[in-house]
Amino acid sequence: MGFGDVLFGRRKLKEAKGERLFALSTARITLETELHLKAADAAAVCFKPLSAGEFVRAENELQELLDLAAAQSGSRIERRSDRFGFEWLIVRDPDFEDLVTTVHLISSELQNRGFGPQLLAAAFRFDGGKHPVYWIYGYKRGAFWPFVPMGDQKRDNAEELELQAKLERELPIEKDLTRWLALFDAPI
Amino acid sequence: MKRKAYGRDIGLSVRMVITMLLLGGLYVAFFVALVTFTNLGVVPLIVLMGIFALVQYFLSAKIALAASGAKVVEREQAPELHDMVERLCAMSDLPKPRVAVIDTDVPNAFATGRNPKNSVVAVTRGLWERLEPREVEGVVAHELSHIANRDVAIMTISSFFAMVAAMLMRFGLYGGMFGGDRNREGGAPVWLIMFAVSMVTYVLSYVLMMMISRYREYAADRGAALLTGAPEQLMSALQKISSRMTQIPQRDLREVAGMNAFFIVPTSVKSSFAELFMTHPPLEKRLARLATISREMGQATR
């Protein structure tokens, strides 16, 4: 954050960084072979839609964008809103590479249309451990972090730190632990 | 620490203004006395004031928590609030602050802390219970914008400069009038003039400080609008908070009165007292600005 932001207050949100998403494609191999974690065939993009006057335009463009993304990738895409007023785009595709590509396509299309700063995170699910493992990609940070929920508002921090240690060399992992946002109600 | 806003009955307002000015005046008087009765020069004096300001700055979060009776809550105790704060932080690229709850029915919120890593955001139980989730989100986003804009640091620095200005004014006058000849006769009345000048300077800087504070509120409102993408939610939250607050008896208001500068809406709204002395801009002006932001957001961004 710049000096001007401090002096006058922020005038815009940070732009999203989506390009590092692809790192998960290669990391998946380690996750599967060494940790026996299998990628689920669904991923999700979470963003904050604008209300106010922007709403109608955003709404039209979003539908257009989803049709485009579905047509290009062959993935199925669903929409869902949550109680925090965030919008989830759930991508389903049996092929993991395609899944990552579609998620990237969606986020870069949102960015092209000027909604980049509204992007929050993407979530990818892996199963095979005691608890489901999510790799969450924070668009503002341009980095991944692990999230292992253990049911009722608890997360398995030990497991998460272990995952970090094992994948540090393959994935851009967020170093600041305080940024490891939880997504307990991820719809995947 | 930041300073209070004022009640809506004149008597109380006057009392509060006087209290605040006295408090600041005491500070100035303390340093004036220090100069007069010791041989400290202007530089060590300013250093000493700097130390005072630093102590305030570093203890800001602790002082605010203690003064408001806010309790830090963990995720298990308030999962939804934590989720909300976390997501907004991720959106605005801030580290997650500690989350606190104040056990009172008055809907309000504040944020404090010297930098984003050491900050606390506190909401009252009333805010959570009486407002819609999207409105609470608007309020929390406003508080997070205060953190992002480093408003505690800004206010601490500006109050430090207010003190220094009062001090320098006094020294300047001293030097100017007597040309450095400190042995001249006529001690007491001159002393009084010096004191008065310091005080006037302080009052002027205080008014300026309040202007800064109000400007920071507008900035935080704008930040919240950007963060949530929904300025109208904050608008309705502000209206709800204000209308509720005016209904609540004075007794309850006074319980939280010490924390006004940090709160999203001062606990006593619609003051008939001069806006000049208020930490927060009046509700109507805030709503008008948010409406403008809302219209701007409606225009194509491409």
Image (cartoon, grey):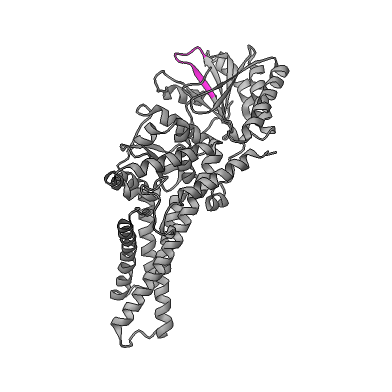
Q: Is residue A147 left or right of residue B126?
A: right
Q: Which residues are magenta?
A: A127-135
Q: Residue A44 at what x, y percent from top left?
A: 58, 21
> Residue at (42%, 85%) from the top-left corner?
B179
Could you tell whether A51 is left or right of B55 in the image?
Answer: right
User: Which residue of the protein is positioned furthest toward the bottom in this rendering?
Assistant: B185
Classify residue B51 by image quadrant.
bottom left
Residue B288 magenta:
no
Query: Residue B241, position in %: x, y?
Result: 41, 41
Depth check, front residue: A173 or B53: B53
Q: Residue furthest left?
A: B251
Q: Nearer the viewer, residue A38 or B148?
A: B148
Q: Position of residue A92 (x, y in %)?
A: 61, 15
**Quarter residue A143 falls in:** top right
* Residue B95 vertical position relative to residue A126 in the rendered view, above or below: below
Q: Is residue B127 above or below residue B48?
A: above
Indicate left or right for B195 with A78 as reference. Answer: left
Query: What percent of the width, then of the height, locates residue B165?
Result: 43, 68
Q: Is residue A177 visible?
A: no
